[in-house]
Amino acid sequence: DDCSEFRSQFEAGGRLSCTRENAPVRDASGKQHTNKCLMCADKLKKEAQRGGGTVQRNKLPASERPNQVRCS
């Protein structure tokens, strides 16, 4: 995994803090990124959106949640 060094830094909210250094790299699809960290941020975010990451994936948007009434 070419992004293993960044996985532990990837936050649950789908963010990875990267520097803005200019060291261009290309991912497997050929897309160019400013540096390896930004490439991995994009990759890890996509994995999380597909359900392979740490982002909460079973939480429905508020508009789709059933109305719940609390009983005492």
Image (cartoon, helix red, strand yellow):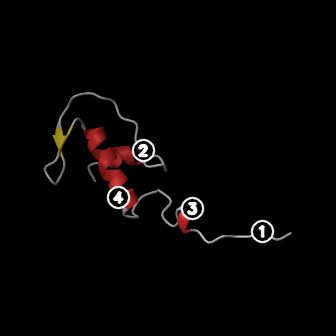
Position of the C terminus by quadrant = bottom right
Q: Position of residue 19 (x, y in %)?
A: 33, 30
- Residue drawn at x 51%, y 67% as measured from the top left: 58
Q: What's the CA distance linking mark 3 and mark 4?
A: 23 Å
Q: What's the CA distance linking mark 2 and mark 1?
A: 34 Å
Mark 2, Cα crowd under 10 Å, few <14 / some 14-19 / many 20+, is some
Mark 4, Cα crowd under 10 Å, few <14 / some 14-19 / many 20+, is some
Q: Is residue 69 left or right of residue 51?
A: right
Name the amino acid, label 1: Arg
SS for callout 4: helix
Which of the two discs, 3 and 2, labels the residue nearer the N terminus?
2
Which of the two discs, 2 and 1, labels the residue nearer the N terminus?
2
Mark 2, residue position: 15
Mark 1, residue position: 70
Q: Say whether marks 2 and 1 touch (CB < 8 Å).
A: no
Which of the two discs, 1 and 3, labels the residue nearer the N terminus?
3
Mark 4, residue position: 47
Name the amino acid, label 2: Arg
SS for callout 1: loop
